[in-house]
Image (tube, grey):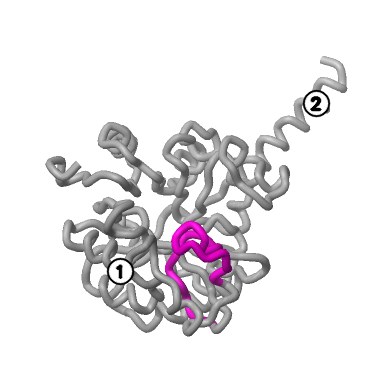
Amino acid sequence: MPVWFWIILGVILVICLLYLLALRCRGSHERMEEFLDHRYAHRGLHDEMKVPENSLSAFRLALRYGYGAELDVHLMKDGNLAVIHDSSLLRMTGADVRVEDLTLEDMNEYHLADTEEPIPLLNEVLPLFEGKTPLIIELKSEGDNAEALAQAAVELLDRYDDVTYCIESFDPRCLRWLKKNRPEIIRGQLSQNMFKRRVEGISWPVKFLLTHLLTNFLTVPDFIAYHCYDRRNLSLKIARGLYGAEEFTWTVRTRQRMRAAERDGCTVIFERFHPDQPELD
C-alpha cells in the first residue's frame, strides 16, 4: 500500500477515536435507579384550558396521579428562581417582558394563560415534592448567566433534603459548573436535532456540536435527554451503548410512542395524555 493510504487511514482512525472520546458519559451514578421507575409529566400535568403548564396546579395534579414532573427554571433579576419555560412572558401571560429582567414584586403582576395561577418560584414547587416522586429540573440559561443560574439552583435545592431531583440543561456551561462544583448531583445533557427544529440565537457550529453531543467530554453527563422524534441519532446510541448513559426521551405525546421508547429502555417525559389513566385521555 502507498504511504498516502496509511496516512489517510491513520487520520480517519484518530478522528474516530476523538469522536468516541468526545461522547464520554459517567453512566454509573449510584442514585440513578431512583429515577428510572417513574414517568414524568412535562411541565407538570397540564392542559391548555384549565391547568397551565409549569403551574402549582399542574404539579399537584402530577403528584395526585403518582407521576414525577419536569420543570423549567430561570434566574430572575433579584436572584429568585422562576418556574416557567420561556424567557419571554408573552406566550403564557401576554406581556412582552423577560423573566430575567423582573423582580418578584414585578412578576406578581402576571398570571398564567388567562387563569388566576401565578408564575411559581422554585422554592414554592419543591415543598410539594418532599418525600414524593422525583423532579427533573431544567436550567434555562440566558446570555452569560449559566453559572449563576446553576449555583443559585443548587443552593436552593440544598435546603430540601427530602426532594429527589436531577438537573438537565441544553447549555453545557450549566452542566460543566455542576461537574466541577457539585459532581454528586445527577446531571443530564438535553438535546435534539438542532437543524430540524426552530432554534434561534445559536450558530451552525454550536448546533452541530449539540446535536451530536460533542460537548459531553466537558460535562460527562449521567443521562441524555433527547427529543423523542430524533432518537435515531448515532451519538445518542454510542453514548448509551459505549458509556452506559441513561436516555430520557421528551416530549412523548402518544401511548404508542411511550411504549416503544420504554421497550428501548428510555425514561419517558410525556404530555397531553395520562399514561396510567386511559379513560382520561
The question of residue 85 being in magenta is answered with yes
Magenta segment: 79-99
The question of residue 137 being in magenta is answered with no
The image shows residue 171 at horizontal and vertical percentages of 59, 58
Q: Residue at x 17, y 61 (%)?
A: 64
Q: Quickly name the residue at label 1.
A: 56
Q: CA distance from mark 2 to mark 1?
A: 58 Å
State whether residue 217 appears in this view. Answer: yes
- Tell me the kind of residue under disc 1: Leu
Residue 148 shows which numbered tag?
A: none
Q: Quickly name the residue at label 2.
A: 8
Above or below, 136 against 11 in this view is below
- Image-based side of 253 in relation to 83, left or right: left
- Image-based side of 124 in relation to 6, left or right: left
The image shows residue 257 at horizontal and vertical percentages of 32, 34
Quick one: label 2 or label 1, which is nearer the N terminus? 2
